[in-house]
Amino acid sequence: MVRLTCLLRRKAGLSPAEFHAHWREVHGPLIEASRSGSHVVRYEQHPRALEDYAGDDDRGFDGVTVQWFESLDAYRAHMAEPDFPDIWVDIESFLDTKKLHFILTEHPQVVMGDGAGSFPLA
């Protein structure tokens, strides 16, 4: 299992509320309905709390997304699908892609909580 974790910043000109609404109501359903999204095992949106903006809406990130894939090959297949360019067009409509940070990671090592002490290799 691999996970794509992305730190997101909204595109200039979008309010935090507009950003979060687009991410939740447009982008999420687009991924879910796409052929590209068929390679995703799990898709999580972790939005920044609107209350956290408190007048300074330009500091930090606007959210984190995590997509789970069975393998690195599945991740690559997701990006190779013919509809991925349509998804990218949507990404560019609400994200500042120049400030997009991402990392591909393997299965986590659980330190505390459910499953602590287990370090699966797959």
Image (cartoon, rainbow, N blue to C red):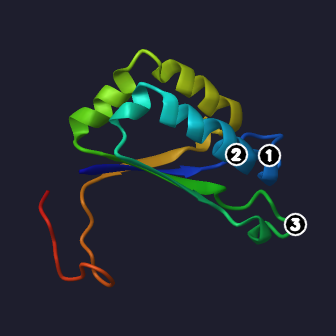
Compared to residue 36, the image places residue 10 above or below, namely: below
Q: Is residue 59 above or below residue 30?
A: below
- The amino acid sitting under disc 3 is Gly
Residue underneath mark 2 = 10
Residue sitting at x 71%, y 50%? 20
Gap in Å between the C-alphas at discs 1 and 3? Answer: 16 Å
**On the picture, is 101 further left or further right than 89?**
left
Q: Which mark is residue 92?
A: none
Which of the two labelled residues, at mark 1 and mark 2, occupies the earlier sequence position? 2
Identify the mark nearer the N-term, 3 or 2. 2
Mark 3 lies on a secondary structure that is loop
Residue 55, which numbered label?
3
Residue 34: image x %, image y %?
47, 27
- C-alpha separation, residue under disc 3 versus residue under disc 2: 16 Å
Q: Nearer the viewer, residue 12 or 110?
A: 110
Question: Which of label 1 and label 2 is nearer to you?
Answer: 1
**Residue, far right:** 55
Instruction: Say whether disc 1 or disc 3 marks the residue closer to the N-terminus.
Output: 1
The quadrant holding residue 23 is top right
Circle number at residue 18:
1
In this view, the mark in front (1 or 3):
1
Secondary structure under badge 1? helix
Tell me the crowding category of disc 1: few under 14, some 14 to 19, or many 20 or more residues within 10 angstroms, Cα based. Answer: few
In this view, which residue lies farthest toward the left? 121
**In contact (CB < 8 Å): disc 1 and disc 2:** yes
Q: Give the residue type that dot 2 points to.
A: Arg
How many angstroms separate mark 1 from mark 2 (CA)?
9 Å
Give the residue at x 27% y 49%.
2
Residue 93 x, y percent position in the rendering: 69, 30
